[in-house]
Amino acid sequence: MTKLATAVNAVTTFEMTPAVETYLQEQVDYLSQQACNQLGTIANYANIAEFQKPASFEQMFGNAEGLAHDSNQRTLKYAAITVATSPDMLVQLKPSGDVYGAQDADGVQSTVFSDTDRNKIQLSDFGYKVVSETAERFAKTMTNVSMLNANFGIVPTTSRTERYELFVANEHAKKRSKQEMQMRTESKFAENKQHNDCIVQLVKVAQATSHLV
């Protein structure tokens, strides 16, 4: 039996069957993947471009000791997480106010908008909207992951082998679904062609026998 803390601080128990455990594990893994995707979206639109750098050989296959690293570069992923958790503090719309001249300590001259905060990432209207809304979804996703972990003790699948197996299974499922859809389309096309051929034959018969009417 598994204890479950409810919203009213009452503790109840239920049977954690293998089916329930499998379902909850799938949900946590799905939410975790969603969180990664949301971070990727934020990294893209917040111009944290290096988040997408191709993984190095060591990241993919490991170093001399055989230790592999996650293909997402950690420092840059943390940058995306920082933006995701504090978008209001770190991003702003591209400024549109009055412009004035500025000169830094090295004598470099530049123009500055009056409403520019140089500590923030400047985004277009669309980019700002995407980052803000994705950050909200990311917060909700992580809240759900934390809730499932707190109540059921389930954590995302972290084994590289398991993650790869899940990826391969998902790719096979997508390929199979695509093949099935193609087969249905071809079957429907063949059915329509047979129907059209039948109509053509009837028309030919009607034309050949029209003088008998």
Image (spheres, helix red, strand yellow):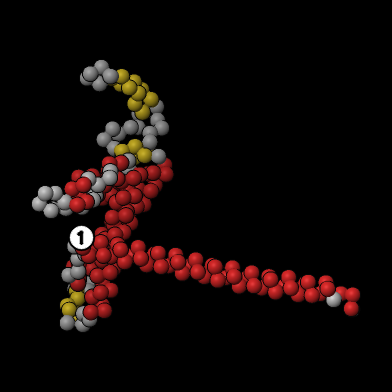
Which residue matches tag 1?
160
Does residue 210 appear left or right of residue 119 in this picture? right
**Relative depth, front residue between 146 and 194:** 194
On the image, the x and y values in percent for residue 123 come to 36, 39
Does residue 84 appear left or right of residue 154 in this picture? right
Q: Quadrant of the C terminus?
A: bottom right
Does residue 98 appear left or right of residue 186 in this picture? left
Residue 95 visible in the snapshot:
yes
Q: In the rendered structure, which amino acid carries the disc numbered 1? A: Arg
On the image, the x and y values in percent for residue 67 come to 13, 53
Q: Is residue 62 above or below residue 153?
A: above
The residue sitting at 59% across, 70% down in the picture is 190
Quadrant in the picture for residue 33: bottom left
**Hey, which residue is sitting farthest front in the picture?**
208
**Relative depth, front residue between 64 and 49:** 64
On the image, the x and y values in percent for residue 185 come to 54, 67
